[in-house]
Amino acid sequence: MTAVFYATTPIFYVNAEPHIGHAYTTILVDVAARYHRLAGDDVRFLTGTDEHGEKIAKAAEAHDTTPQAYVDHVSGRFRATWDHLGIDYDGFIRTTEERHKKVVQDVLQKVYDQGDIIYGEYGGLYCVKCERYYTEKELEDGKCPQHDLEPEYRSEANYFFRMEKYRPWLREQLEANPDLIRPDGYRNEVLAMLREPIGDLSISRPKDRVPWGIPLPWDEEHVTYVWFDALLNYWSDLVSHGLDDRYWPHTQHFIAKDILKPHGVFWPTMLKAAGIPLFQHLNVHGYWLVENRKMSKSVGNVIRPLELEGRYGNDTFRYFLLRDMSFGLDASFHELGLAERINADLANDLGNLLNRTLGMLGKYRAGVVPAFGPLREADEALRDAFVNLPSAVLREVEALHFDRAIAMVMEAVASANKYVSDQKPWELAKDAADAERLDTVLRNCLEALRCASILLDPVMPWKMAELRAQLGVDGDVILDDARHWDRLEAGSAARPGEPLFPRVDLEALKDTMDLSVAATAPEPDGPSTEQAPLQHKPEISIDDFAKLELRVGTILAAHDHPKADRLWVLTVRLGPETRTVVSGIKQHYSANDLVGKTVIVVANLAPVKLRGVMSEGMILAAEDADGKLSLAGLDRALVDGSEVR
Ligand code: MSP
């Protein structure tokens, strides 16, 4: 891991209350920062609020208040939400703070003085919600793709930042530095933007139309365009604390794909013009969708983080968000999915390992941690599964594979549960001659729990501290302790408490949801008597059937096939694994229909290249007489990776 880690979230607009999307990025950076702190790195984590601009001024007007009073209120709500969720940020910046305004004005003046800001006239299509101009090409059906709104034509005399001038330089940077923007798909998107002229960036607004902003230092009649103002927060926070030398070279920005262009194009060219070195990484994640749609107030599907936290607890909510999104891809939120994840991973696996271990320790050893006897092969295998994990987990975190990092720890937890079933401590307890063996088995389970609690601490800091307390371990969490199998003290007492992860009652949850389906089956299309007789295949034995490995999967993403119009390249999650499956269902299903869908996958089909793309499985679908397809699914939600027999 790097020794210094400066991580930022976007600064959020204060025209709406925080929702699960804002919470995701903030929790993600909190988790990343905690992993880096655990590794001993020098960490600074910055978040904040974006408070200038036309839409904020409009929101204040709609609330019948002044912009300042309004931004104070909503910024306070963001901060209170993060505090409530235990987000351990080091800096919180507001663009209305004097320290920020000063840095913005200094940078503007420098760029103006060197001739990179010029005065001119510009007309174009402007989306007020994005606060930026769109080219015709960027629009979808003439509408802004982010807000599904028709942009308005605007023409103004403004100051322009000579962004186009820096386009060749930025292309070179991206070519020379392949992981500047991660994952790759987003880097390619930015490279594609840079293949054509990007134009100059209008960086001011006339004060008489948009008074709510930072005045240009050389022309008080204009205020700074919000993006030029907002992006500089990442720099102004450090400069205002004198921390730029220490942290800036290690900057990692975390954003979602919605603001790729400002961060991937505006920001690096601004930095170049201002003489500030480039950030280290721009890390871009996908979108949380709800029932495969974007969250929006008008659709009424906005998910509030505090409501979920209230119902399920902070740690489990964090666990779900990190475990169920593959960085870079979209994910579909469903409360049932959250509840199932809690039950499967936390109640059944980790919680169960803790309960059964402490239960047996209480029953057989009066709750006192035993000493090890000699280790057998199975004990060593369990130990190695854990003590080799820390470096691997940190590597995955560094590569932004948070889901895999967690899955690795949970696989080790599953192996500990299997170890208990194999070693049968309850049998050992029956014979005094097996006392030393029983000690060893119990001690191994306790060490496994202790190591797991360290490795999952960044994701679930409060529950993991509770877990360690139940094991009788106090004090700071130290990563190195997870590399050692002997950190518990023989003779110390465990302090069993309440179950850490109570099961969620899925039936009761379903009752509260609108999962209603028609009580009677619909009439089939046309009477079956008119169907031709079925053409059967040769009979197979049950053993032949058993060769098939069918599993439940969730489609995480659907991408166009580079060479074939009728094929989707699907990313399908099968529990701990993800597969690429090339599927000929494009005429029947749009990407929107597919992402988030549960499907049945033939998981042991030999991989095959389909028009140049390797396919690692097949998705089951039924076909009617007209060749129309319908994907096979389940009648209730199950955890991905479950076997279908
Ligand atoms: N103020 C600008 C950012 C300026 S940064 C210099 C802005 N604010 S925002 O309030 O709209 O926040 C956008 C960010 O919120 C996304 O980039 C992402 O971090 C988060 N998310 C908002 N909706 C989201 C989802 N549905 N899913 C995941 N993250 C999302 O843009």
Image: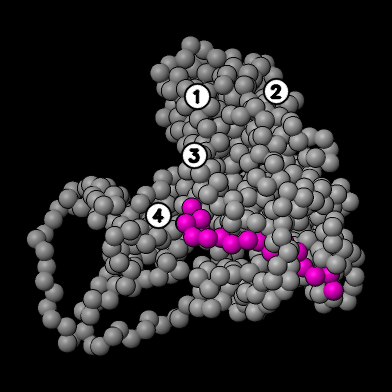
Residue 196 location, x and y as percent?
49, 60
Q: Is mark 1 on a helix, strand or loop?
A: loop
Camera-nearest label, 3 or 4: 3
Mark 1 or 2: in front is 1
Closest to the observer: 576 or 439? 576
Q: Which amino acid does label 4 sit on?
A: Thr
| Residue 555 visible in the snapshot | yes
476 vs 193: above or below: above
Give the mark nearer the N terminus: 3 vs 1: 3
Q: In which quarter of the image is residue 365?
A: top right
Q: Name the residue under label 3.
A: 176
Image side of residue 141 versus residue 367, left or right? left
Mark-to-mark CA distance, 2 and 3 = 57 Å
Distance of label 4 from label 2 (alpha carbons): 47 Å
Q: Which stretch appears magenta?
A: 191-208
Mark carried by residue 571: 4
Which label is found at residue 527?
none
Q: Which residue is drawn at 76% across and 53% down?
A: 112
For residue 493, which numbered disc appears in the image? Answer: 2
Quarter of the image that includes the C terminus: bottom left
Q: Earlier in the sequence, mark 4 or mark 2?
A: 2
Distance of label 3 from label 1 (alpha carbons): 34 Å
Q: Does the magenta stretch include residue 205?
A: yes
